[in-house]
Image (cartoon, rainbow, N blue to C red):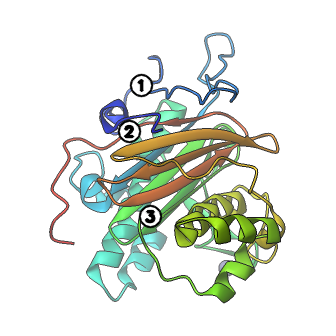
Amino acid sequence: MPLDTSADLVNAILASASRSLAGKPLQQASPRSGTPAARPARRGSGPVAAAYATVSTTAEVLHHPAARESLLTEVERRRAARFRHEASRLDFVAAHLLVRLCAARSLGVAADDIELAQYCDECEEHGHGRPYVPGRHDVQVSLSHTRGVVAAAAGPAAVGVDVELLGRRSVAPSVLEQVLTQRELRVSGRSRDPQGVFMRQWVRKEALVKVGRTSRATMREVDLSGLPPAPAGSGTSVQRSRFEGLHVLDLADKRRGALASVVSAVPVLLTGEVRPPVPLSGR
Ligand SMILES: [Zn+2]
């Protein structure tokens, strides 16, 4: 059963990105029965101890007045310019803007005040890899983009987000075996929609990689078969669960065609969509 409708998701991270965080969270899904409530704890009158995550279309982000390409750093602009396809370049730009808006909201500052940098642990090089906000240890960020859809998250603890297209169905069996545990393979094999089961576990594991819990090389050892299956139903559905002390938020957004998961040590608030929504045609 879907826990949220798309109407529940309509709130305004971007509209409020430059405002302070004084207000309460705009959206809070009902926890599944038996799942610990994801209501964030407050530390005195300080900021909400939760991560903010947003999934949007690239077009929605780029149409928002606060999402100005001029916010990007020189490094980001050079990377963006290397994309051969304009649509891919725009996906990159939108994700890098959206993560600033999430970080701004998490810190209660303006998006202009958020600098974004990246560092790759594998290459030990700057300019790509794990994103971070230099000089701000009180916020951690994550971003993801695919064709026409972007996701970003920011919070006071490590956070990871991954987004893929809903309904992408082109996964070879050899790939399944590189990603899923034996138990997960059995569950997916019994499913009427094995590729759908795979994609949900894939976005969860990508989010776990980004939060530092596993790696591409070891993700097949992380068994998520105990988590509830993907949220189903028409429209938009959100599901919360826990995995080894982490909060897991799964989103299936049919209108945007997005499948996303967010993981964090703190509860995750899905902070809705960019306003105003724009038609998805043209992609
Ligand atoms: Zn690298």
Taking the image as drawn, is residue 276 in sight?
yes
Q: Quadrant of residue 2?
A: top left
Q: Amino acid at mark 3?
A: Thr
Query: Label 2 vs label 3: CA separation?
Result: 26 Å
Give the residue number, with chain letter if any, for mark 2.
Answer: 272
- The x and y percentages for residue 18 are 37, 33
Q: Would residue 199 appear left or right of 248 to someone viewing this image?
A: left
Q: Quadrant of the C terminus?
A: bottom left
The crowding category of the residue bearing disc 2, from other C-alpha atoms within 10 Å (few below 14, some 14 to 19, many at least 20), is many
**Contact, mark 2 vs mark 1 (Cβ under 8 Å):** yes
**Pointer 1 local density, CA inside 10 Å: few below 14, some 14–19, many at least 20:** some
Of mark 3 and mark 1, the one earlier in the sequence is: 1
Mark 2 residue type: Gly
Residue drawn at 59 percent across, 73 percent down:
128
Lower sequence index among marks 2 and 3: 3
Residue that mark 1 sits on: 26
Mark 3, ligand 1, within 8 Å: the answer is no
Residue 253 pos. (x, y %): 38, 51
The x and y percentages for residue 113 are 45, 43
Q: Quadrant of ligand 1?
A: bottom right
Q: CA distance from mark 3 to mark 1?
A: 30 Å
Marks 3 & 1, CB-CB < 8 Å contact: no
Mark closer to the observer (2, 3): 2
Marked residue nearer the N-terminal end (2 or 1):
1
Q: Looking at this view, is 71 or 64 the one in front?
A: 64
Considering the numbered disc 1 on the image, is that residue within a helix, a strand or a loop?
loop
Residue at position x 69%, y 16% from top? 43
Instruction: Residue 113: tell me if it is visible.
Output: no
Label 3: few (<14), some (14–19) or many (≥20) C-alpha neighbours in 10 Å = some
Residue denoted by label 3: 73
Q: Amino acid at mark 1?
A: Leu
Q: Nearer the viewer, mark 3 or mark 1?
A: 1
